């Protein structure tokens, strides 16, 4: 989720690119850089930290030239550092890149064997070297030549001293738009970067390559010239930042298919699951006898689902702890205990303290995290990144579903290394995981149903959420989402436990959201719902498409496609997010910044 801006025209490129990058800081902000071309020479400046650091440096050493590219980085491969910041310059070419080059390791090995010298740890630099090693007459021809060599999701913009007015770019499963001006043209990963200059855009399609000069834009697909329509955008700058959505939370709900694809990307080569950032030796994985998952808030709910995954797939006993509790209890850990902090931000104070304690007691610590090189990652022995991209809405959405996918991968990995699952079984699990983004796209298409529901129910003072087994934590998460952003009192409960307390609360004023998708405990859950209905509770059921049995039992029925039971929490989380979002929005709440809450809680 990095931000890209490029310019070619008659004006000075640097200030235009810098201003554009500032509008993209929400896409990532751990380092930044700009490269321009002037008098046939490429120059660049890069800086660590937020854009202000780059701006200060550029004030000292401004870049001349009326063509250039810039980048604000959200690290995926290689920690935030100046060498890892973009642009990457090799020979006559400078490039910026957003996305992941899946096969960069093998490309790098090959390039190094033939003498290429790498300066960074990034996947991007392999593309810069490929462009150098395979150079043809023009940058465009070179790009055509190397594209078949790279795999993954990427948008790339590049400039070259041999073609000093042409910006070349490519889009593959990562956003990239061309902005059209008069005697100048632009490229950016998102519209807000360019709104100060133009409202006319070409939205590139996957596989499109473009050559952009101040006077022309030529687009190619599979090497053939193609026409793409010009669209005029009427968004306000603040709506544009949110991709046209009303809130970041809604945008992030919609980003989940992409976020899940990025989390799964490049991990499985058809035979072996490789989680190299875990940095565990085969012996260390073989010796894991116990696992402790430690987290706060929504990440703790991910841990609760993770326990089911790790116990069912890897057959290792798991405890799940709230980090603020774990800190102050006696920890029985040794070198055969794997402690797994789960954290979106990597900065939560309680989770960090819990990790330090566990390490002190001799446990191996690997973190599931969304932010590269965050404090918790730096303290850990290894890491499994979620690659959801920056999450800005305080209520966690895409970070949660990608945490579930990451924990599923972790369970598969341990099972693989401990020889519980063979390669064919792993391949089957991965195929099921890879099918999820399309399923979630179907759920997203049904958004209107949740809006209608919220219109009717946003004034109710209490909600109960019920689930069982893998979906018990989804009931907890549904309740947490609702209370966080709508300030409605909500409780999540294991439906079998309802008779031990919450059933006393049920009356005709109580909406009860039941996660009732196909499962081994489906019949038992249905009996629990009968108990709700018998007490006049308002049943709101989340069921599978094929389940037609809820017409009489439920006031409202939401449907999702059926997936294997273990993966159903990843799908079922999305309706919970929509319910909370639309209820809060109808109530007029500040969805992205709810009262009293913070995105990252760095105090105890
Ligand atoms: C805060 C946020 C939650 C988040 C929790 C843990 O309370 O508002 O959305 O789940 O912190 O954050 P972490 O970054 O460690 O996942």
Image (spheres, rainbow, N blue to C red):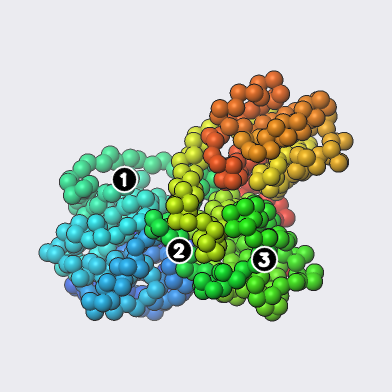
Instruction: Kindly state the secondary structure of the residue where label 3 is placed.
Output: strand
Which of the two discs, 1 and 3, labels the residue nearer the N terminus? 1
Ligand 1 closer than 8 Å to label 1 CB: no
For residue 294, which quarter of the picture?
Answer: bottom right
The x, y position of residue 24, in whole percent, is 44, 58
The x, y position of residue 2, in whole percent, is 43, 60
Which of the two discs, 3 and 2, labels the residue nearer the N terminus? 2
The residue shown at (24%, 67%) is 130
Residue furthest to the left = 137
Callout 1–callout 3 Cβ contact below 8 Å: no
Does 301 appear above or below 327? above
Q: Is residue 602 toward the left or the right of residue 325 in the image? A: left
Callout 2–callout 1 Cβ contact below 8 Å: no
**Residue 3 in view (yes/no):** no
Q: Which residue is mark 1?
A: 205
Which of the two discs, 2 and 1, labels the residue nearer the N terminus? 1
Q: Which residue is mark 3?
A: 290
């Amino acid at each position: 989720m990095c931000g890209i801006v490029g310019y070619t025209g008659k004006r000075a490129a640097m200030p235009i690119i810098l201003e554009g990058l500032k509008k993209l800081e929400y896409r990532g902000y751990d380092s930044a850089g700009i490269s321009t071309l002037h008098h046939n020479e490429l120059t660049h400046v890069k800086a660590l930290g937020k854009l202000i650091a780059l701006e200060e440096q550029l004030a000292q050493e401004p870049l001349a030239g009326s063509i250039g590219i810039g980048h604000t980085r959200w690290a995926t491969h290689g920690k935030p550092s100046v060498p890892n910041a973009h642009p990457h310059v090799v020979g006559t070419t400078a490039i910026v890149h957003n996305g992941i080059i899946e096969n960069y390791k093998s490309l790098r090995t090959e390039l190094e064997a033939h003498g290429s010298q790498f300066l960074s740890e990034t996947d991007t630099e392999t593309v810069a070297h490929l462009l150098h090693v395979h150079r043809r007459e023009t940058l465009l021809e070179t790009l055509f030549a190397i594209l078949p060599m790279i795999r993954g999701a990427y948008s790339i913009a590049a400039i070259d001293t041999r073609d000093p007015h042409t910006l070349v770019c490519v889009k593959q499963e990562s956003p990239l738009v061309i902005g059209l001006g008069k005697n100048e043209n632009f490229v950016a990963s998102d519209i807000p970067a360019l709104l100060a200059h133009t409202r006319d855009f070409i939205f590139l399609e996957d596989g499109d390559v473009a050559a952009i000069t101040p006077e022309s834009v030529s687009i190619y697909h599979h090497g053939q010239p193609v026409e793409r329509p010009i669209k005029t955008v009427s968004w306000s700058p603040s709506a544009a930042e949110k991709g046209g959505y009303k809130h970041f939370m809604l945008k992030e709900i919609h980003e989940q298919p992409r976020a899940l694809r990025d989390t799964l990307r490049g991990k499985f080569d058809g035979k072996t699951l490789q989680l190299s950032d875990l940095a565990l030796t085969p012996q260390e994985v073989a010796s894991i006898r116990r696992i402790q998952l430690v987290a706060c808030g929504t990440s703790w709910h991910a841990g609760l689902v993770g326990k089911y995954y790790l116990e069912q797939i890897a057959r290792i006993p798991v405890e799940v702890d709230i980090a603020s509790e774990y800190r102050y209890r006696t920890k029985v850990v040794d070198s055969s205990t794997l402690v797994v902090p789960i954290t979106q931000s990597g900065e939560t104070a309680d989770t960090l303290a819990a990790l330090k304690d566990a390490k002190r007691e001799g446990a191996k610590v690997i973190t599931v995290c969304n932010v590269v090189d965050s404090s918790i990652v730096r303290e850990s022995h290894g890491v499994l990144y979620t690659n959801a991209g920056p999450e800005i809405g305080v209520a966690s959405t895409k970070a949660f579903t990608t945490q579930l996918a990451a924990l599923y991968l972790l369970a598969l990995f341990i099972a693989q290394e401990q020889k519980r699952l063979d390669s064919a079984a792993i391949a089957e699990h991965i195929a099921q995981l890879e099918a999820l983004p399309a399923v979630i796209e179907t759920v997203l298409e049904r958004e209107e149903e949740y809006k209608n529901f919220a219109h009717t129910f946003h004034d109710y003072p209490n909600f109960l959420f019920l689930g069982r087994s893998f979906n018990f934590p989804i009931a907890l998460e549904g309740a947490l989402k609702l209370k966080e952003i709508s300030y409605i009192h909500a409780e999540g409960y294991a439906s079998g436990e309802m008779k031990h307390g919450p059933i006393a609360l049920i009356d005709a004023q109580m909406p009860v959201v039941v996660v009732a998708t196909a499962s081994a405990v489906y019949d038992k859950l249905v009996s629990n719902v009968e108990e709700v209905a018998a007490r006049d509770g308002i049943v709101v059921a989340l069921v599978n498409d094929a389940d037609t049995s809820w017409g009489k039992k439920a006031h409202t029925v939401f449907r999702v496609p059926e997936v294997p039971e273990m993966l159903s929490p990843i799908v079922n989380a999305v309706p919970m997010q929509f319910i909370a979002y639309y209820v809060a929005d109808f109530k007029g709440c500040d969805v992205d910044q709810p009262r009293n809450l913070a995105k990252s809680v760095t105090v105890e």
